[in-house]
Image (cartoon, helix red, strand yellow):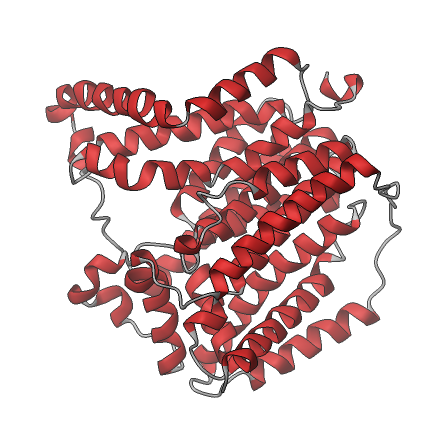
Amino acid sequence: MTFVQSVLAVAAGLLLATTVGYALARFFADGLSRPEKIAWSFATGLLAQSLLFVLCISIAPGRGTLPVVLLDAFLIAGSVLLRTPGRRVPSPIRIRSGTALLLLVAAAAWLVFLVESLGEPMWSTDYLAMWGLKGKTVFELGFVPMRLFQDPALYWAHREYPLLVPFSLATLASFAGAWDDQALALLFPLCELATLLALFGFLARRVSTVAGAAAAALASLDFFLYRAVNAGTAEVPFALTLVLVCGAFLDVRNDPTRPAVVRLVVASLLCASTKQEGTLFVLLLAAAMWRSRRRAVWALVVPPVVHWALLYVLRGPQSRRDFDLTLFEPRRWMELPPLFAKVLGRILGTEALLAWVPLVGIALFFAVTRRGIADPLLPVFLLQILCYAVAFSVSSFDPMYAIDGAFQRIALTLFPAFTLVLGARLGSRPQEAR
């Protein structure tokens, strides 16, 4: 199979996943703008296809994608036959010249990432050692082998990590009929595209089209996140899940309708199944919602609990080699303050100095703009960074080595979601801000 044929096969698999996602998302997408519906359909489809794929290979190993396609057809047909309840139709999005220019910037930046991703096979260390290894193993064997989680020789492959990205890669490879590292990279530019659509659609619906276009343009220029080295890892899909869960959080906080709560459930599950820190983020969101919408807190808390319980059943208890948790024991408490101070000094010193221009720009922007509807997310972002600092403090390796190797990468996955805060300040409605 040629490269073009492989890319087309992967694209067909992604299109089918999005179609299945739309068949499911149409029941909880009431009131969303069209760009948001596309983003939710894409993300929901990835989750649904991965679950169906694992279910099928667990029941009938090595049977290929035919059982998955049959289940897809059943879901799509059922969605067509079932009627959705009365819909709230949002106002149409009108694109003016300024908005169009910002969207062109976002499109140009996205094309750069698309070309970089497809220009060569995925090659990053994390892809080869973790995400790609697990996905290719599942694809080649036709089932999920327990040795992925029990073999001591694979201890370095982070057996404790969530599995949505490896399962998504394995599913797409099954549709393509081969494991083509270069063609499978198409997943990651499309994750970015869904992220930009979610940003634009949410802010266009809740604030203004200019705010949405500005947020999409800013997120697309996050070239430290959207670059070839991150194709094959979980960072780019994780950024998408963060945008979706933040949008659902803000919708529920404003008006806890049933569709909005269901979106919060789905987004929470997406976050937890993509990266470990996704569970931390949704729990922080739950804490932020405790005072205003206590009844909706379960929508954030239950999905991660169920997710990790299922993983425990699937693969058993897993140790974490990255952290020395004995530092939390009373006998070692006195070691924590100097380690934490050292980590904070590195983050606020070296790391902050490297990004002083955008940080100063953000500070000035906050100084000249008024409170927006997304400002309740600010404490969550700050606490997430603080938790990263705590995690670096208890690193099993040198904390400075851990910061230099990971802090910038994991912090920048928050930036697309953070543009919701920035964009909302460009035209927030006073009554919604209050």
Task: Give x and y (percent) for residue 23.
Answer: 73, 65
The answer to whether residue 298 shows anywhere in this view is no
Task: Give x and y (percent) for residue 150.
Answer: 22, 66
Q: Which residue is located at x 46 percent, y 23 percent? A: 357
Task: Give x and y (percent) for residue 159.
Answer: 28, 59
Which image quadrant for residue 74? bottom right
User: Relative to the observer, which residue lies in front, 28 or 91?
Assistant: 91
Which image quadrant for residue 85? bottom right
Task: Give x and y (percent) for residue 278.
Answer: 45, 43
Question: Against 397, is 358 above or below?
Answer: above
Question: Against 82, is 251 above or below?
Answer: above
User: Relative to the observer, which residue lies in front, 221 or 197?
Assistant: 221
User: Relative to the observer, which residue lies in front, 149 or 182?
Assistant: 182
- Image side of residue 15 versus residue 2, left or right: right
Q: Quadrant of the C terminus?
A: top right
Q: Which residue is located at x 26 percent, y 19 percent? A: 345
Q: Residue furthest left?
A: 331
Q: Residue furthest top?
A: 367
Q: Which residue is located at x 40 percent, y 68 percent? A: 121
Question: Against 150, is 419 above or below?
Answer: above
The answer to whether residue 179 shows anywhere in this view is yes
- Image side of residue 274 versus residue 266, left or right: left
- Image side of residue 280 versus residue 378, left or right: left
Which image quadrant for residue 367? top right
